[in-house]
Amino acid sequence: MTVPVYPFDVWIWAALDPVLILVAVVMGWKSDQLVKLILVALMAFTASVLTSWLLTMAGIPWPAPIGRDLPTFFPVRTGGAFLWALLAFLTRLVVRRRA
C-alpha cells in the first residue's frame, strides 16, 4: 500500500477555503477572549469540511475538495482557521484602541 502524496498547492488551498475564512474572520472578530479562538477554529473547520464535502458530492469544483478518497487536511484547515480568527481578533483590538 502506497501513501498518497498531494502537491503543496492543495495544502495551501485547504487553508484558503472561502468558507473557512468567512467563518473564522466573522467569529474571530466577535470573540471577546483569546482562548475562544480555539473553538472558533474548530467551528470554522467543521463548516469548511461540511461545505467542501457537500459541494464535492454535488460535482461542483472547490479549491480543496473532500471525498472518500480525498484527505480533509485537518491540521492545515484548523491551523489556518486559527490564524484567520487571530488576525480578525487582533485587528478588532487595534481598531477599538484607536476609537
Image (spheres, grey):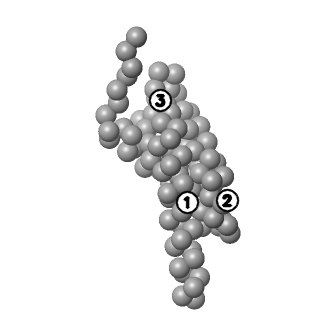
Would you name the residue on which mark 2 appears?
36
Residue 82 or residue 10, whichever sits in front: 82
Q: Identify the image quadrant of the C terminus.
A: bottom right
Left or right for 36, reference 95? right
Which picture quadrant has residue 36? bottom right
Q: Secondary structure at mark 1?
A: helix
Q: Amino acid at mark 1?
A: Ala
Q: Amino acid at mark 2?
A: Lys
Spatial separation of the CA atoms under disc 1 and disc 3: 23 Å
Would you name the residue on which mark 1 appears?
85
Determine if residue 60 is in view: no
Q: Is residue 86 depicted above or below 16 in this figure? A: below
Q: Residue placed farthest to the bottom in the image?
A: 99
Q: Residue at x 54, y 63 (%)?
A: 86
Q: Identify the image quadrant of the N terminus.
A: top left
Q: Which mark is residue 71?
A: 3
Q: Is residue 1 depicted above or below 74 in this figure? A: above
Which picture quadrant has residue 11? top left
Q: Is residue 65 depicted above or below 43 in this figure? A: above
Residue 38 or residue 69, whichever sits in front: 38
Q: Secondary structure at mark 2?
A: helix
